């Protein structure tokens, strides 16, 4: 009877997701669009006051000062945005958006797979474009994301999508961009639920765990050099790391872990790596710079990990690393990460509040992240020839008090900014006005 009740509850929750499905994706752009008068934040540090931005066939055709542009506006849709701001669409890397809808409903959870070594598992085919959580990203300007699997030592392969699509085939921006590895922890804490002390202690299995990963990579390379029979899908997936077609995203936070991970990558012939998390990256900043290793920095809105860390270390670390010439983007993994992904612009705003130039902070969630993910030729900045994935805000998009979107476009399509939350806001606003 108890199991039956759980099944009925799960079915009801899934049914509610269908009934309140995502907004219908916007149709393909038909007319050229000209946006006048806004302050354009390009994403590379440049700002254009009183700008003119023209969208043609889903691409940015013009971006310049309105005073310098001469053209015939006949037949165009004109948007007057005087006093407002234009930004590139924000990008949420290392995200499980669209992989989990309701945590308590197992059938809606596709974030991880059983087993330790799953480089062949593709998050893209599990991505749910009907997710109501994904829909709620758009009113804050988060229009794209890197959909990333979790669990195991090698979690699987991520892909990058835009957040207004009928299905994953329509959504994809870059398919199978990289493989994600959870680096072994050099130090562990006691399991409090078993009554163990919570203090840090050396992980006695660390060397063995690193050796296991090294052996797995060696086996993969041996497989690639052989006749590939019988077919081994996990080893096949790793080939992209050796020929440079995929990046290795190493999820690691400790100073020792980061150092050992870089050594591992160099010794095993992996062409491109990215550090994800990197809480102690500031301790090995020179090593990152020397090897040209970019970083997706862990959630800015968090507490220090150690008692002797500065209280504001998570807030100011982005500036420290950027000032040293390291390519930094922001990621938001952690507790309640999917619903919190909408707060991505405010993480960048906190970095600006703690010393980083405002336009540099913007780059952390636009052009820098696009470069790290390898999609900078398509998105990440307001440049001619790139996808017209952008939005107009009434105020500063990095400030939760003023970021109020009036228009948003994905690949030139005028998308809806409505969500379940905005509908409820209007509903109860009307109620209390009566």
Image (tube, rainbow, N blue to C red):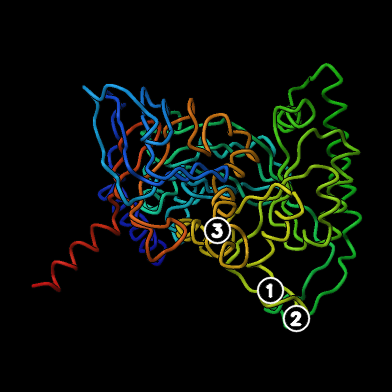
Circle 2 sits on which residue?
Answer: 307
Instruction: In the rendered view, tell whether residue 102 sits above or below residue 225.
Output: below
**Dot 3: within a 10 Å radius of its alpha carbon, few (fewer than 14), some, or many (20 or more) residues?**
many
Of circles 3 and 1, the one toward us is: 3
State the residue at coordinates (57%, 55%).
361
Q: Does 425 sit left or right of 289 as displayed?
A: left
**Dot 2: within a 10 Å radius of its alpha carbon, few (fewer than 14), some, or many (20 or more) residues?**
few
- Dividing the picture into quarters, in which one does residue 77 lie? top left
State the residue at coordinates (24%, 63%).
425
Q: Are marks 3 and 2 in contact (CB under 8 Å)?
A: no
How many angstroms separate mark 3 from mark 1 (CA)? 18 Å
Dot placed on the residue nearer the N-terminal end, 3 or 2: 2
Dot placed on the residue nearer the N-terminal end, 3 or 1: 1
**Dot 1: within a 10 Å radius of its alpha carbon, few (fewer than 14), some, or many (20 or more) residues?**
some
Expressed as whole percent of the image width and height from the top left, the position of residue 404 reads: 33, 56
The extreme front residue here reads 67
Of circles 3 and 2, the one toward us is: 3
Q: Secondary structure at mark 3?
A: helix
State the residue at coordinates (62%, 60%).
356
Of 401 and 187, nearer the camera is: 401
Of 189 and 44, nearer the camera is: 44
State the residue at coordinates (59%, 52%).
360
Expressed as whole percent of the image width and height from the top left, the position of residue 341 reads: 49, 56
Circle 1 sits on which residue?
Answer: 304
Label at residue 247: none
The image quadrant where one finds the C terminus is: bottom left
- Dividing the picture into quarters, in which one does residue 426 lie? bottom left
Circle 3 sits on which residue?
Answer: 348
Q: Secondary structure at mark 1?
A: loop
Q: Does 349 sit left or right of 327 as displayed?
A: left
């Amino acid at each position: 009877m108890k199991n039956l009740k759980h099944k009925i509850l799960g079915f009801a929750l899934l049914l509610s997701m269908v009934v309140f499905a995502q907004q219908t994706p916007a149709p393909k752009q038909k007319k050229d669009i000209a946006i006048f008068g806004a302050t354009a934040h390009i994403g590379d540090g440049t700002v254009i006051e009183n700008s003119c931005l023209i969208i043609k066939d889903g691409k940015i055709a013009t971006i310049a000062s309105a005073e310098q542009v001469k053209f015939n506006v006949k037949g165009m849709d004109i948007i007057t945005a005087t006093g407002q701001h234009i930004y590139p669409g924000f990008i949420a890397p290392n995200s499980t958006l669209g992989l989990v809808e309701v945590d308590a409903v197992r059938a809606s959870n596709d974030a991880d797979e059983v087993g330790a070594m799953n480089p062949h598992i593709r998050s893209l085919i599990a991505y749910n474009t009907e997710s109501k959580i994904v829909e709620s990203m758009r009113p804050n300007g988060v229009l794209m994301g890197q959909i990333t699997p979790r669990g195991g030592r090698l979690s699987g392969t991520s892909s990058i999508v835009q957040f207004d699509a009928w299905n994953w085939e329509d959504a994809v921006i870059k398919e199978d961009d990289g493989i994600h590895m959870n680096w072994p922890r050099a130090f562990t804490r006691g399991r409090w639920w078993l009554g163990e002390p919570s203090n840090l202690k050396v992980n006695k299995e660390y060397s063995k765990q690193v050796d296991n990963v090294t052996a797995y990579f060696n086996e993969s390379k041996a497989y690639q050099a052989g006749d590939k029979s019988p077919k081994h899908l996990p080893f096949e997936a790793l080939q992209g790391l050796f020929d440079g077609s995929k990046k290795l995203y190493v999820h690691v936070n400790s100073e020792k872990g980061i150092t050992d991970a870089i050594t591992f990558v160099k010794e095993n012939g992996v062409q491109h790596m990215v550090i994800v998390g990197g809480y102690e990256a500031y301790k090995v900043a020179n090593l990152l710079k020397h090897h040209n290793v970019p970083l997706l920095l862990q959630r800015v809105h968090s507490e220090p990990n150690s008692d002797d860390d500065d209280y504001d270390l998570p807030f100011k670390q982005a500036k420290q690393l950027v000032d040293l010439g390291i390519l930094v983007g922001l990621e938001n993994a952690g507790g309640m990460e999917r619903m919190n992904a909408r707060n991505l612009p405010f993480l960048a705003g906190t970095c600006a509040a703690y010393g980083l130039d405002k336009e540099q902070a913007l780059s952390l969630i636009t052009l820098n992240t696009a470069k790290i993910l390898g999609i900078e030729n398509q998105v990440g900045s307001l440049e001619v020839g790139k996808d017209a994935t952008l939005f107009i805000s009434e105020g500063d998009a990095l400030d939760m008090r003023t970021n109020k979107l009036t228009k948003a476009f994905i690949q030139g399509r005028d998308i809806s900014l409505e969500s379940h939350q905005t509908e409820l806001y209007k509903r109860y606003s009307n109620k209390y006005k009566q």
